[in-house]
Amino acid sequence: MIPNDDASTLHRPRKRLFIGVLCGACAAVLLLAFLLWWVPSVGLANIHPALPVVFGTVLGATALLLVAGLGLLILTLLTGRDLFFSDRLRGIVIKYLFPGIIALGRRCGLDRDTLQQSFIALNNQLVRARHLRVPPDRTLLLLPHCIQLFDCEIKITGDVGKCARCGQCDISGLGELADRYGIPIAVATGGTLARKIIVERRPRFILAVACERDLSTGIRDAYPLPVIGILNSRPHGPCFNTELILDEVEAALREHVVSGTP
Ligand code: SF4
């Protein structure tokens, strides 16, 4: 487990990066819209004098819609409130903007992990803006198997309840938290098993712990289910004896799980 004192220095992904790249993309689209209007408008005027105005109106309306959507997204993030359609906005970000922003960010030389961290932070805030309160039995705490101590001989993938709570890895603390809040907990060895667990348990809210890549994919796969992603840390390298900040998990449970919570 990562000591609480270190919590403030770890994994503070910045949604601002994702928003910044998004703004850059928006500016590029506006410029492109202007060029698309300006370049052919000379020729269009030759066909009919009103055509440049019609074409310009259509392009302008499209560009305005884009800017309004971005403005709404930024306002939702700044206020932390569900202003309008925060879930729809999350859907648009997840389905359409995420792949484009990652590709654009990579072209600009930005680190993929940092971009994915930013996307996860942005997703989390959009989920938080909905102020969900979900019963414990409709919540799912989904963990990666690399949180378990590599040398532990107990197989917990099928049943986390088998953990002897020896305290040598974070499964112990997570098990105690899950008991205290009365929520189901599951360990997935990969995306396929994670999807199977979600289909079987049919949660209404998922609290998922994983690395940047798995969380980004998982959040997108699970949509429209609300998922709050918590990054694990890899002090011993990827996929091996990973750790997390238990307080982060508890804070999310306290925020979103109803009755039965302490
Ligand atoms: S806390 Fe549980 S899973 Fe971790 S090493 Fe101990 S018995 Fe194994």
Image (cartoon, rainbow, N blue to C red):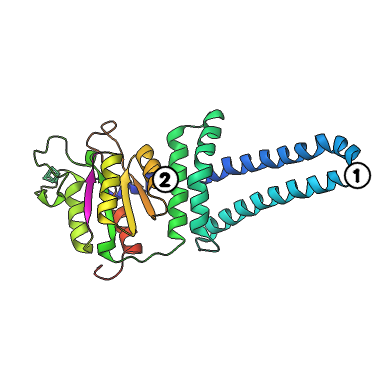
Where residue 211 sits: x, y (%)?
34, 39
Per the image, the residue denoted by label 1 is: 49
Screen quadrant of the C terminus: bottom left
Spatial CA distance of label 1 from label 2 is 47 Å
Give the side of residue 55 with respect to residue 227, left or right.
right
Picture coordinates of residue 125, whole percent (x, y): 46, 55
Instruction: Classify the position of ligand 1 by quadrant: top left, top right, bottom left or bottom right.
Output: top left
Residue 195 sits inside the magenta stretch? no
Q: Which residues are magenta?
A: 184-189
The N terminus, quarter of image: top left
Label tally: 2
Q: Amino acid at mark 2?
A: Arg
Picture quadrant of residue 224: bottom left
Report the magenta stretch's main SS: strand
Disc 1 C-beta below 8 A from ligand 1 = no
Residue designated by label 2: 220
The residue located at (30%, 68%) in the rendering is 258
Q: Position of residue 197 (x, y in %)?
A: 25, 49
Q: Horizontal and vertical percent for residue 16?
A: 53, 46
- Residue closer to the observer: 134 or 78: 134
Q: Residue furthest front?
A: 47
Asked whether mark 2 lies closer than 8 Å to ligand 1, one says no
Mark 2 secondary-structure assignment? helix
